[in-house]
Amino acid sequence: MRKSISGPLGLFAFVFPLAVAAGNLSEVVITANRVPEPLDAALAATTVLTRELIQARQATSIEDLLQGVEGLSIGNSGGPGKLTSFFVRGADADHLLVLVDGVRIGSATAGTAALQNLPVEMIERIEFVRGPRSSLYGSEAIGGVLQIFTHRHTGDGFRPEFALTGGSLGTRRGYAALAGGDDRAWFRLQASAEATRGFDACRGSSTQFAGCFTEEPDADGYRYRSGNLAAGWQVGEHTRFEGNLLRATSRAEYDGSFTNESRILQQVAGLSASRELEAGGRLQFTLGRAWDRSRDYLGESFAGRFQTRRDSASLQWNVPLAAGRLLTLGVDHQRDHVASDTAYVRSARDNTALFAQFVGDAGPWRTEFSLRGDDNAQFGQHATGTAAIGYAWSDAIQLLVQAGTGFKAPSFNDLYYPFFGNPELDPERSRSFELAVRGHAESARWRVSLFATRFRDLIGLDEKLPAGQYRLGAGARHRGRHGIHVAWISRGIRSHLAGHRESLRRPEPGQSSGAAAAALRASGSGNETVAFYNQSGRTGYLTLRYAPVSR
């Protein structure tokens, strides 16, 4: 089943994270438009977490690292390694697409990526794009895209690194890496491990059917091991090959009446080849595979397993048309496969898509237009598009307007999970609009955004069925999220003020108001249960780190 926990909606948050270096205003990003471009050129709301910022925050998990990031709400159900949900501008947790080095990851059954089980030590940078990106990436990119880049070797010769950490809750962590090579050929090998005894994850009640529906007043530990190998090879002046393999295994204890321990494997493998064309432009081919496996236990008894595999292939051609204008053409293919001891009516599906994008600058104007057509073997054809226009009011202030559509194919759990799934579900759809103004001055950057998103065919629990029976249905046929977001970074301090509100239209004929309300609860509000999950409170850690000084 889809599970998510989040904080209250419609509230304002004023956040002052740890002070860090402000960075270069012209830093290059890739995720916003699938092409390298300066951060201050891309019109989409984009946040970059560099390696310097990651080290300054001393975060112990990805959810800790992303706390306070603009437009993102995070809900954790009981500490390290436990189920963690990420909500972008009030959208559902499965409306965030996650990439690792360009490879799409996530469970085809749960519909979300288990970011809590990926190691922070192996991350070089993170790019987080807010707003609809389905016209470039397809399903799941309704709320935004988060891309994780693992370490690459820069420089000449060999470079060893290691770190040891100890701290609260019996936490022990180790990390080691070895990199070598030069600009023509390089490699990087990394390994990390962590163990913590944790704390009681949940204060549930089996009599009131609240929280985790059970009383287990014990410490719920967590441990993981991970390894990463990446390499690159430059052939001549125009051709480059890169490959990477990330493997992470974890064992998480939690409280539950059906299962209370999960042993999880995540693997991501990618291979890319790119060539700079003599006539101008760039051609890139990418192959990827992501594995997601979970073996669940209740005490020492085996309770079930879920295993999904996601294969992907992409061919992209960047064509420069004139100075300041770029046309991008591409084709994506994806195949999802499920293997489980739970019976699924269907265990695989394919999706093929064509996409095109135009990005151009003309005086004070900048335009971004993208269009994508997805042909899903199960749900047929879906077209999505995004249009964005920016106008430079002055050298330091820019006005922006953006509109886009998105869609999300139901997960295999949504469709076929026993007693809950509904094979008649349609894909979720969205329409988004954003009006923004942004600017910069010396080392400061700021942005004010007013956004609105309307969803259709959202998936939620249907209360029209007899008591004791549950099934996923179209829930609220129309639901909207709108809000305002202010963000700035000045002299090394990132701050933001944000708020959003949810609106629900009148139910369709034949739909109960209870079904509509259930849809809202099932889609990610979770306020009635969040209070039962404990958090670590104040913790302390000491880290000893060695890394050669770059010359």
Image (spheres, helix red, strand yellow):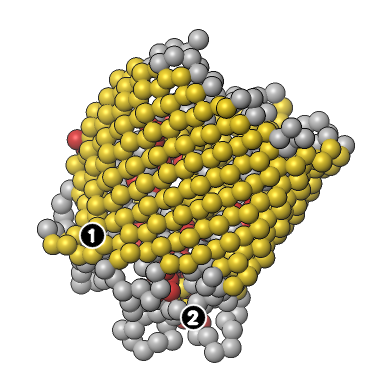
Cα separation between marks 1 and 2: 28 Å
Left or right of 167? Residue 138 is right
Disc assigned to residue 296: 1
Q: Are marks 1 and 2 in contact (CB under 8 Å)?
A: no
Q: Quadrant of the N terminus?
A: bottom left
Left or right of 460? Residue 479 is right
Image location of residue 440, percent across then percent down: 71, 31
Vertical placement of residue 528 versus 241, above or below: below
Label 2: which secondary element: loop
Instruction: Give the mark nearer the N terminus: 1 vs 2.
Output: 1
Number of numbered discs present?
2
The residue pinned by badge 2 equals: 424
Left or right of 254? Residue 373 is right
Image location of residue 36, percent across then percent down: 65, 36
Residue 80 in which image quadrant: top left
Left or right of 117? Residue 431 is right
Vertical placement of residue 149 versus 550, above or below: below
| Identity, as a three-letter code, of the amino acid under mark 2 | Glu
Residue at 66 percent of width and 51 percent of height? 330
